Image (cartoon, rainbow, N blue to C red):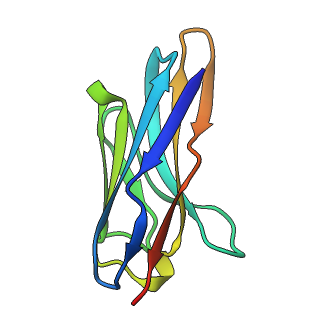
Amino acid sequence: QVQLVESGGGLVQPGGSLRLSCAASGSIFSINAMGWYRQAPGKQRELVARISSGGSTNYADSVKGRFTISRDNAKNTVYLQMSSLKPEDTAVYYCNGDISNGNYNGRYWGQGTQVTVSS
């Protein structure tokens, strides 16, 4: 089994910063791309940022210049550094990873972590 566990969410004032972490564990042979998505109340889940195994990144236009995705392959962990946060960034943030156990390639999701931007 593979598990992804997020941490680092919370309440922050507009203009503040937060750093999310997501650690993968279990029967892992290799991890390809990893990413962060978010879902606000009443809205569909949307891509925030993704990073390939080689470090190539892509971002949603709404977070470019404010958010930075990175990964530590030795720790099977992906991070999302969020700065200049806005109320519209409020959502549940989910990480995912394209992970192989050597026999099966699957996309796995974490349970989500709440980020609330409010004064």
Residue 45, placed above or below residue 119: above
How far from the left and from the top, in percent, is residue 4? 51, 36
Residue 7 or residue 63, whichever sits in front = 7
State which quadrant residue 43 falls in: bottom right
Q: Is residue 74 left or right of residue 21?
A: left
Residue depicted at x 46% and y 84%: 87
Residue sitting farthest toward the right: 42
How far from the left and from the top, in percent, is residue 84? 29, 78
Quarter that holds the C terminus:
bottom left
Q: Is residue 39 left or right of residue 49?
A: right
How far from the left and from the top, in percent, is residue 77? 35, 36
Residue 21, placed above or below residue 38: above
Quarter that holds the N terminus:
top right
Residue 81, placed above or below residue 76: below
Residue 6, placed above or below residue 12: above
Q: Is residue 115 left or right of residue 107?
A: left
How far from the left and from the top, in percent, is residue 9? 42, 61
State which quadrant residue 24 falls in: top left
Residue 60 or residue 85, whichever sits in front = 85
Residue depicted at x 61% and y 9%: 103
| Residue 82 seen by the camera | no
Residue sitting farthest toward the top: 103
State which quadrant residue 100 falls in: top right
